[in-house]
Amino acid sequence: MTEVRFTGATLDRAAELRNDRLAMDRLLADPRARFVGASAGHVVVSSHEADGGVHLLRRPLDGQVNPYQPILLGLEQDGRPLFAADVSEPEAGALLEATGAGRLLSLRDAGLLLSQAEGGLAAYLVALLNWHRTHMFCSTCGSGTKVAEAGLSRRCPRCKASHFPRTDPVVIMLVADGERALLGRRIGWEPGRFSILAGFVSSGETPEEAVIREVLEESGIESRSPRYIASQPWPFPSSLMLGFEASADGGEPVPQAGEMAEVRWFTLEQITAAQQSPGQPGDGSLRLPGEVSIARSLIDAWVARGGRRL
Ligand SMILES: [Zn+2]
């Protein structure tokens, strides 16, 4: 299977330093320390002058990182500390523009343009900042919370509750009956746009059980033998996609009311054709999910095996 985008960050998350105030002060004072910036759906990038390749822009701290509540991403491979800064405030964006050093790039585009390791770092950065931005208040007592463990968690000064970054597990599954794969079009998607089925794991449910349930709910098809293939952090805003393959014995799909506009079986030939010549919206052709998604990775891997199961 091809490498899944938004995975493969090479950063050392430095768990052992996070509760050590002296060590944190040293990292904050390190002249090699840098920060990378992101808003809810964008990252700050720059291009290499030599080859034009895009990377996350690393800049000196220069007051952009709160020394009392720093968000440390970790240590780079050369030991350089790397912090995170939220650039969603208008003044931060203005500063960025004024310095002319970087530009905002949507995370989806970044997933395609950045190297594998930089894409993994971008997903980590956006997911962590999204969580901090939306968890300023304690869910137990309602008081304001503070950054703890150098950004790994938040703590309530009043009731002392600790809060940890939330990740929502989602199963996404390629269901095949031999030579055909089951694809669905959600309500609101333009005609021709299809992907494999997906849904949130419920409370008290294993991912394997969620696969069987979601396929039945969204398509009326009974599937079996779900097998885990790969995963992908998907920080839009905080999901973890768990990729599966499952088998079925064909049958006529029935799209779930209120959710799915269409669910259909597509042959290996139809899907291969859509890979080779992606159509335009409105031309009636099958259009597969973008290459940034694990949905596409699972489809491509299935096609590469000629539709056979692993
Ligand atoms: Zn509290």
Image: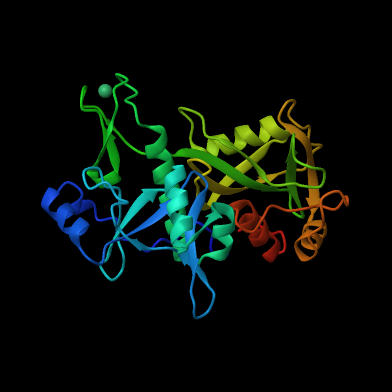
Residue sitting at x 21%, y 56% = 28
Q: Taking 75 as reference, is 125 left or right? A: right
Is residue 205 something that shows in the picture?
Answer: yes
Across and down, in percent, residue 171 comes to: 56, 41
Quarter of the image containing the C terminus? bottom right
Q: Nearer the viewer, residue 90 or 119?
A: 90
Residue drawn at 41 percent across, 51 percent down: 125
- Looking at the figure, which quarter contains the N terminus? bottom right
Query: Outermost residue, bottom direction?
Result: 50
Whether residue 287 sits left or right of residue 115 in the image: it is right
Of residue 188 and residue 239, the one placed in the foreground of this image is: 188
Residue under the image location 28 percent in, 30 percent down? 145
Q: Which residue is at the front of the view, 231 or 80?
A: 80
Q: Quadrant of residue 257?
A: top right
232 to the left or right of 176: left
- In the picture as drawn, the residue positioned furthest to the top comes out as 141
The tally of labels here is 0
